[in-house]
Image: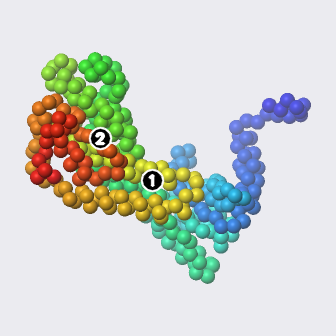
Amino acid sequence: MFPDSNVAKTFKCGKDKTSYITRFGLADFIKRDLISKVKGPFLLMFDETLNQTNKTKQLDIHVRFWEGKQVQSRYLGSQFMGHATAQDLLKHVKKCVDQFDLRSLVSISMDGPNVNFKFFELLQQDHAERYGGAQLVSVGSCGLHTLHNAFKSGFSLWQLDKLLKAMHTLFHNVPARREDYSAVTKSIVFPLSFCGHRWIENLPVVERALVVWSSLLQYMDAVRRKKLPNPGTASFNTIEEALKDPLILAKLQFYTTVARTFTPFLKKYQTDEPVMPFLSKDLAELIKVTSFSSNLTSSYPLRAEARSSSLSHRCKKGWTSSCVVSLASPIQSFGLFARSCSFCPMDRPLWREAFL
């Protein structure tokens, strides 16, 4: 380990000694060095999660500050809690940052549970009492949770999650069924796994579902004509039920449209880089785009009659799986999308304009 020193050659260090040296030696030095570097405005970032080892809630705190010409984001420390009310969070955060000059604290970065908003309110009150009415900058919370839940609330009404999960489960870890699928469709491309708690990140899953849709229809048709054995599983029954919906492809395309609108914004701001100065402009542009789409959508309300029309009966040239036209731009409304879908590649109307 240390070939240049005869003394160091005999050095041995097990896991217990390494942990002791790190915790009571190096950690204290690193923390004091970090505190000495934070000489100007800074902000705190925190998040809590369950520690599987000691079965407590672990509150990790990071600090972000200017150093030279760069913004640094550094780990500060952890607090371990049983209860995690707003008052508990305030107590533990103040304990972790007790060596900092909180006059220079600019803001708090956090995710969006209600307990965190209450914590921020208590911290604002405490900060104002200590420093003559000074207030921290409020920039809200992490929008990922809110947006994922919004996607879940909206698209779960169409049960797209059940369909996408079923498409993946039907062929996952079933070699015989995968062989039958490939033999009928001449394709080795299969559906991807759907993540139930990261809805907007399922864009590749939905895109893959649209890619394999025609192959899936071939497989389902072969089963119906008894050329292939019926799997007799819940996933197969779910897909069979979804195929009865004449608008199922439109719903999947609508999902991709909305996800493609928001994904670039989320990727840009899910970063350690200091992008806050650009947030207001980009957020205003995003709101403008979504508002424009909503106004267009309201111009083409779907009527109940559309549910009774069968796309497969309207198109006589076998274009059922291809009637949903790819969107020219990721920023489209459902109204425009439905209008573009009203004609199949043979220029034959699938829906009457009165339906839209």
Viewer-proximal residue among 77 and 315: 315
Label 1 neighbourhood size at 10 Å, few (<14), some (14-19), many (20+)? some
Q: Quadrant of the N terminus?
A: top right
Left or right: 287, with 62 as reference point:
left
Can the viewer see residue 232 in this picture?
no
Viewer-proximal residue among 139 and 56: 139
Q: Look at 64% across and 64% down and name the residue there.
A: 42
Q: How many marks?
A: 2
On residue 138, the disc is: none
Left or right: 78, with 313 as reference point:
right
Q: Earlier in the sequence, mark 1 or mark 2?
A: 1
Give the CA separation, mark 1 to mark 2. Answer: 22 Å
Q: Amino acid at mark 1?
A: Phe
Left or right: 282, with 167 as reference point:
right
Viewer-proximal residue among 244 and 60: 244
Left or right: 144, with 77 as reference point:
left
Can the viewer see residue 318 in this picture?
yes
Quickly name the residue at label 2. 326
Residue 218: image location, x then y, percent: 22, 25
Label 2 neighbourhood size at 10 Å, few (<14), some (14-19), many (20+)? few
- Where disc 2 sits, the SS reads loop
* Above or below, comparing residue 84 to residue 11 in the picture: below
- Where disc 1 sits, the SS reads helix
Residue 4: image location, x then y, percent: 88, 32
* Above or below, comparing residue 286 to residue 187 in the picture: below
Quickly name the residue at label 1. 265
Q: Look at 13% across and 45% down and name the residue there.
A: 351
Q: Residue most toward the bottom? A: 132
Q: Look at 76% across and 50% down and name the residue there.
A: 25
Q: Look at 38% across and 47% down and name the residue there.
A: 260
* Above or below, comparing residue 127 to residue 18 in the picture: below
Q: Are marks 1 and 2 in contact (CB under 8 Å)?
A: no
